[in-house]
Image (cartoon, helix red, strand yellow):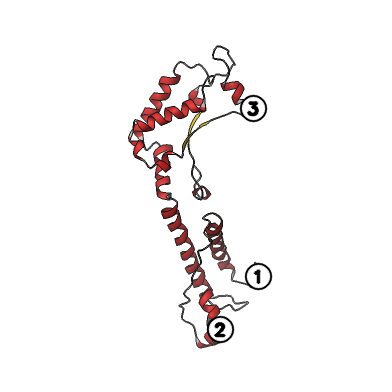
């Protein structure tokens, strides 16, 4: 921003308001929302007469005067704009994108909050792979089946379906691993890989857009 346009201490708040509006447009895909600034600030007669009817003042909430070191009207306008933008974002994330339900799911599934589910999951993995000497013969779909069985047999099954659909299984691969050659190798053939299911299994929760912009599990 060229020097003299707005006071330096207001550059940050103005930038944050712009980022919030960009988030609404590009992440929330809300093109119809508009910010209505009341402009209900007390001003002296000189400023009001300079506005010439107050149409621009009603839209912006302040009257711009260049090279002004301190503009309390602009400061209050930015504060009100920030409140409007952030309130709309928070409302949209909570009401339209189920933010609180997804955050609760992260707590339950990634921070071990759903104890009965993890007990059933660990038991299922141990029963299925206790005699497995390596990662040979371990497939993603078989791990996902064990996770689904653990969900059905515990209280986790009562969580919303849009939450359960986000629970996935990932395989932790080392650089240079060939998933087809490593996991599809016949069980009787040794490949020198001493890893077990506990080394490659990862439970993942796929946070949907637009929450992915602010939540990084």
User: Residue at 39% of width from left, 29% of height from top?
Assistant: 149
Ranked by sequence position, the earlier of labels 2 and 3 is 2
Q: CA distance from mark 2 to mark 1?
A: 24 Å
Question: Tag 3's secondary structure?
Answer: loop
Residue 39 at x, y percent in the picture? 48, 76
**Residue 184, picture quadrant:** top right
Q: Residue furthest top?
A: 188
Residue 86 at x, y percent in the picture? 47, 61
Report the residue marked by disc 3.
176
Relative horizontal placement of residue 178, taking residue 81 as reference (left or right): right
Question: Tag 2's secondary structure?
Answer: helix
Say if 215 sits above or below 122 in the image. below
User: Residue at 37% of width from left, 28% of height from top?
Assistant: 120
Residue 188 at x, y percent in the picture? 55, 11
Report the residue marked by disc 2.
51
Question: Tag 1's secondary structure?
Answer: loop
Residue 144 at x, y percent in the picture? 46, 30
Q: Mark 3 packing: few (<14 Cα in 10 Å), some, or many (20+)? A: few
Q: CA distance from mark 3 to mark 1?
A: 52 Å
User: Residue at 56% of width from left, 56% of height from top?
Assistant: 26
Ranked by sequence position, the earlier of labels 3 and 1 is 1
Q: Mark 1 packing: few (<14 Cα in 10 Å), some, or many (20+)? A: few
Q: CA distance from mark 2 to mark 3?
A: 67 Å
Which one is in front, 104 or 33? 33
Report the residue marked by disc 1.
3
Ranked by sequence position, the earlier of labels 2 and 1 is 1
User: Residue at 43% of width from left, 58% of height from top?
Assistant: 91
Say if 63 sits above or below 80 in the image. below
Q: Are marks 3 and 1 in contact (CB under 8 Å)?
A: no
């Amino acid at each position: 921003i060229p020097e003299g346009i707005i006071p330096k201490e207001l550059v940050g708040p103005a930038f944050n308001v712009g980022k919030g509006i960009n988030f609404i447009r590009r992440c929330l895909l809300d093109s119809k929302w508009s910010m209505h600034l009341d402009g209900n600030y007390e001003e002296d007669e000189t400023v009001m007469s300079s506005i010439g009817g107050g149409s621009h003042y009603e839209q912006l909430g302040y009257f711009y005067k260049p090279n002004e070191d301190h503009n309390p009207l602009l400061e209050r306008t930015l504060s009100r704009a920030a409140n409007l933008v952030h309130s709309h974002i928070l409302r949209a994330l909570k009401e339209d994108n189920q933010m609180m339900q997804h955050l609760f799911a992260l707590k339950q599934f990634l921070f071990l909050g759903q104890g009965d589910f993890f007990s059933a999951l660990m038991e299922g993995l141990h029963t299925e792979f206790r005699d497995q000497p390596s990662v040979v013969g371990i497939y993603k779909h078989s791990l996902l089946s064990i996770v689904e069985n653990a969900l059905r047999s515990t209280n986790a099954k009562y969580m919303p379906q849009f939450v359960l659909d986000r629970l996935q299984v990932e395989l932790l691969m080392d650089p240079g691993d060939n998933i087809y050659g490593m996991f599809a190798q016949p069980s009787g053939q040794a490949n020198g890989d001493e890893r077990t299911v506990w080394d490659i299994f990862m439970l993942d929760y796929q946070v949907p857009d637009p929450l992915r912009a602010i939540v990084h599990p």
